[in-house]
Image: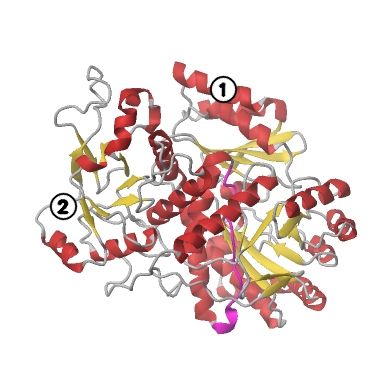
Amino acid sequence: MNYCDSPFTYLRRPAREVMVGKVGVGGDNPIRVQSMITCDTMDTEASIAQTLELAEVGCEIVRITAPTVKDSANLQHIVRGLRARGCDVPIVADIHFKPEAAMEAAKWVEKVRINPGNYADSKKFKIIEYSDEQYAAELERIRERFSPLVRLCHERGIAMRIGTNHGSLSDRIMNRYGDTPLGMVESALEFARIARAHDYHALIFSMKSSNPKVMIAAYRLLAARLREEGADWNYPIHLGVTEAGEGEDARIKSAIGIGSLLRDGIGDTIRVSLTEDSIHEIPVARALIDTGRREVESRNGLPTPVAGLSFDPFSYQRRSSSTIAVAGVGDPGGASLDIGVSAPGYKVRLGGEEIVRVAIRRAGFDKIAHKVDRMGDYKPEFVYEDSGIAEVDPRDDASISTLNKSADARLVAVADGLDLPVIAAYRLLAAKLDPRHPILLKDSLLIAQDPEAEFLPTLLRAATNIGALLCDGIGDAILVQGEHGPGQALRLSYNILQAAGTRIFKTDYVACPSCGRTLFNLQTTTARIKAATVHLKGVKIAIMGCIVNGPGEMADADFGYVGGAPGKVNLYVGKTAVRFNIPEAEAVNRLQDLIREHGKWVDPQPDQQVELSNIADASR
């Protein structure tokens, strides 16, 4: 199956145009940016005000949650108020669980988003073996529940997003396909076939996950399956990493998932989901689109190698390589050494089963050598120029052939200064290079020269280029050289590894963006939880405002903090609820107790205590 025309040359995936109000999605339209308001849908004036704020900063489509029929009915007043104020931004009703709410919302909005995992199914995490006849009967039940909405959307001429979430697949899908990208895609296609049976085609698809690897694989599989279904299955695709969190980590995770797919030509509309005020999502989304456009417009494409891809685009597996040793920075066991000086013969192992390592340029290392011992988790592990690395042009078959014939494995990187897109260049290198040779990834083939350069585009480019390749399974070491400041470049390097799920070196948080369903203040709650737990390296904590995606998205989290009712919190271990209806004022302490019970708690060290205090102060 092919998910794009070429993983080596940019070509945007052709999609039919679907109109969302006056905004065209797909076709020849630019990639659209959307977001979601966070207030109670029953608060008409607040909903209008937040929508106007989003429109003013460039949001082109606004989504509003409609959890009940009453909320859906109030969309009429919100839309009427917006139009009276001269705002024609399309409104999307976000529906979970209640077909009746969808039917009411479809009377007033320009688009309805439904989640096939819970639109007509109640998720109970039951293990049931469905016979073909039972499965067909379930599909018929869904057809009866879903068809009235399809007919109403068709009659009104409004659009629909079939938005699958990794965290809310139905029991039926889970039992037949598992908690997999294939299950996500098949769940959406079942609903699409019902819509098509009614000759309704104003469809947009999405495949969201908080895990970039899962998200990328699901979208690729969706694009490939739509191709297989036929030319008239060319529906637009909406991209998003759900529950990305906040701050730099959330921007990095979003860039890895969304940016990598945009570079492959997949995506007609995007949303960057931040646990922050919604207006902060728009400049990140705009910068992500602009950064990707400049990258593909200013670089040459590459021919597809005879060997094809070195990786399976639909299933993650790290590229095999031999383990080698390179000259390392410092010596973790040599406290008596001078600061920043390498121990004689000290080596860093990389490749094979080793963790992905972080490199620094000699010029950058010279600037920070005096403080390496105070850099905590963001220390460089080896100096690029001291590693014996081989630099090649991936189009130079003679140079690669020489490497492949060599007796010893070498660390290899794409040479600087080439006018090539980074992702395509490294994919080509991996396809041609003998797999025993480890590969070092670069965020840019140009070394940063401008200390005043804006950081956000640098962050997004680095996260997209390196993160996309890590999710392809390529890369045994990384070097961020598109950022001028060496300390900031190292922090960015480690945070990319964390966001890609490649190397977990700190507490990992999965936090959803706020919306009208949220049962507590996500921003302040997330800050309080971080202040209590940020020193727990390697522990993954999910913070969910409501139950919609909570248990599913927390499947690979160690612990979960989920809104269960107004002022009440449920605590989870994995996807199992173990504490119920805890008063919000007590919930963070009870979460700490739960972590202790399961042997994951350690007391913070003195230097970590300072960091915890700073986070706590910032959250007040």
As rendered, which of 25 and 147 lies closer to the eye? 25
Secondary structure of the magenta portion, mostly?
loop
Instruction: Write the start and end of the magenta stretch as one range.
Output: 231-245
Q: Which mark is residue 409?
A: 2
Label 1 sits on a secondary structure element that is helix
Q: Which mark is residue 79?
A: none
Label 2 sits on a secondary structure element that is loop
As rendered, which of 568 and 473 lies closer to the eye? 473
Question: Spatial distance from mark 1 to mark 2, Cα to Cα?
Answer: 46 Å
As rendered, which of 419 and 303 lies closer to the eye? 419
Q: Is residue 129 magenta?
A: no
Give the residue number, with chain letter if any, for mark 1.
Answer: 614
Q: Quarter-wise, where is residue 486 in the image? A: top left
Q: Give neighbour class at mark 2: few <14, some 14-19, many 20+ (Cα, 10 Å).
A: some
Residue 166 percent location from the top left of the image: 56, 56
The amino acid type, in three-letter code, at marker 1 is Asn
Q: Quarter-wise, where is residue 139 in the image? A: bottom right
As rendered, which of 299 and 305 lies closer to the eye? 299
Q: Point out the tag, 1 or 2, that comes first from the N-terminus.
A: 2
The amino acid type, in three-letter code, at marker 2 is Ala
Residue 465 percent location from the top left of the image: 42, 54
- What residue appears at the point 77 percent right and 71 percent down from the top-left corner? 149
Residue 481 percent location from the top left of the image: 36, 45
